[in-house]
Image (cartoon, helix red, strand yellow):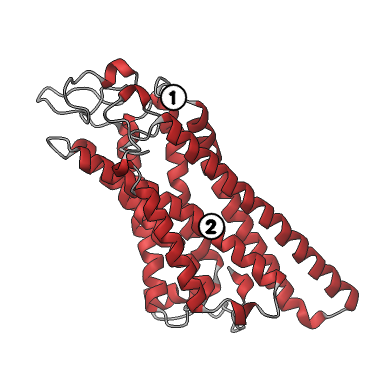
Amino acid sequence: MLRGAAAMGEPQAQRLAAPGNASAPSAGPSVAPGGDGGVAVSPWDIALCATGTAVAGENALVLAVLFYTPSLRAPMFLLIGSLALADLLAGLGLVANFAVRYLLRPPSEAAELGAAGLLLAAFSASVCSLLAITVDRYLSLYNALTYHSERTLGFTCAMVLLMWLLCLGVGLLPLLGWNCLREPSACSILRPVTKDNAAVLAVTFLLLFALMMQLYLQICKIAFRHAQQIAVQHQFIATAQATSTRKGLSTLSLILGTFALCWIPFAIYSLVADSSYPAVYTYSLALPATCNSLINPIIYAFRNPDIQKSLWLACCGCVPSTFSARPRTSSDV
């Protein structure tokens, strides 16, 4: 994933095929030397680059809708924008890795480490944004009466900025020494990240996901308790709010479920595998992981009524009559 998935999982002997050039492309199963001194493009790398292009375009559309729609200024939409920006940068990082590997001649260590850092920062921000969305959903249900007064736009902006500064710090790690360019035997499947550092990243990811799942379980308990109270008290006037809560839970389930299916196998593999494993295993797990950034905007565009309405207005200048005029609530995301 870092520096194009073709550079992941090759044997050490193959990585040392170009003496004196630590950043030279390796001749793994996906890359073969070309007759003109170049390298043959791997179909896997083409797929990753195409996925990155689609991810960047799709998330750019989400960001444009949020930016040009004045009504979408609530804290919840700021969190959606943070996730879309992270996925946009992840898509650009995949394209940049392809360009560094195949188009940049002679190869540059700084460019390789920069592209790897961009992917680290982007995917870290994506995970943290999903965690922030989960926390926001939890607070909107746990502190329903005071949520709108406590979760102000300024407070949310400050938290998002702090989160991004932390993720940018993670992205700088390859440039600060978290790389194996000078010691190829220490490389993980996440080249140029070392095996030890890749294990730290994988464990951190799994712990963050466990925290998200714990918060999600608490959200389900609160939502079910609210539903039982509504049923007991026969407050049928609250049906709209209950429907909105169920929709919010359904959306969150889709986001976390898709995230788990896409990323958990790759995280576990990066924890137990090393650079001697066949590259095809890394490719087959890295590609679904990157597709998570392609799925996220689809979930938002098709399930959030406000974003849907903005898309309809931007595309054809009209809004279908099926859209409800009800006010937006915090559980809609």
Q: Position of residue 42 (x, y in %)?
A: 28, 31
Q: Is residue 257 visible?
A: yes
Q: Residues within 10 Å of mark 1 (few under 14, many from 20)?
A: many
Left or right: 224 as drawn, with respect to 27: right
Residue carrying label 2: 130
- Answer yes or no: is residue 49 visible: no
Left or right: where 247 falls relative to 188: right
Element at badge 1? loop
Q: Which mark is residue 127?
A: none
Q: Is residue 47 above or below residue 171?
A: above
> Which quarter shows the N terminus?
top left
Residue 226 placement: quadrant: bottom right
Q: Position of residue 177 (x, y in %)?
A: 32, 38
Question: On the rendered structure, is 133 left or right of 106?
Answer: right
- Identity of the residue drawn at 32% across and 18% down: 12
In the rendered structure, the answer to whether residue 104 lies left or right of residue 158 reads: left
Q: Which residue is mark 1?
A: 274
4, 181: nearer the viewer: 181
Q: Residue furthest right?
A: 232
Q: Residue at x 39, y 61 (%)?
A: 85
| x then y, percent, for residue 137 | 63, 66
Helix, strand or loop status at disc 2: helix
x 40%, y 60%: residue: 165
Q: For marks 2 and 1, give the CA distance.
A: 28 Å
Q: Amino acid at mark 1?
A: Asp
Amino acid identity at mark 2: Leu
User: Where is residue 205 drawn, in percent x and y?
Assistant: 53, 44
Which residue sits at x=58%, y=68%? Answer: 333
Against 99, is 228 above or below?
Answer: below
Q: Tell me whether circle 2 and circle 1 mark residues in contact (CB < 8 Å).
A: no
Going from N to C along the chain, the mark reached first, 2 or 1, is 2
Near mark 2 (Cα within 10 A), the count class, few <14, some 14-19 or many ≥20, is many
